[in-house]
Image (cartoon, rainbow, N blue to C red):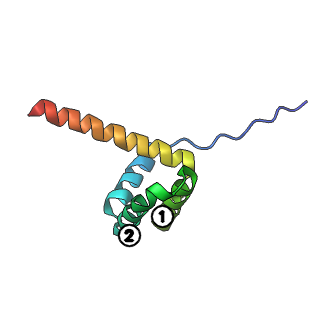
Amino acid sequence: MKWFRKKKKPALHFEDAARFNWVLDTNQELQEGMAKLAEQFPNLTEESYTEKALELFRRAGLELSVEDLKMLLTLRRETDLMLLRKKSKET
């Protein structure tokens, strides 16, 4: 009997997070699209919001899954928090 295993998706690497952050910080079209999407947030379900966000990232050149997006946003938030804590300790 053969055991079938779900193929694991490649893990995200440092380069993936760096590219995500660079695109998010430098792509004006993506920033404008995310700002417009944020305005629509009260009228959207989480699923439709996520799909629209993924489409914006695709147009910016990043092919992400829902899981990738959530992980990269979490990493970005945690990095921002670490930098804020470091900055507050220095002052």
Which image quadrant is residue 7 in?
A: top right
Q: Secondary structure at mark 1?
A: helix
**Above or below 37: residue 6:** above
Residue 61: x and y, percent?
48, 64
Horizontal side of residue 83 vs 44, given as left or right? left
User: Which residue was labeled with disc 2?
Assistant: 29
Amino acid at the residue labelled 1 = Leu
User: For the view shown, which residue lies furthest in the right direction?
Assistant: 1
Q: Gap in Å between the C-alphas at discs 1 and 2?
A: 9 Å
Q: Residue at x 14, y 30 (%)?
A: 89
The tally of labels here is 2
Circle 2 residues within 10 Å: few <14, some 14–19, many ≥20 = some
Please say if 65 is above or below 71: below
Q: Badge 1 is on which residue?
A: 56
Quick one: 79 or 38, which is closer to the camera? 38
Residue 21, image x and y in percent?
36, 52
Front residue of 29/38: it is 38
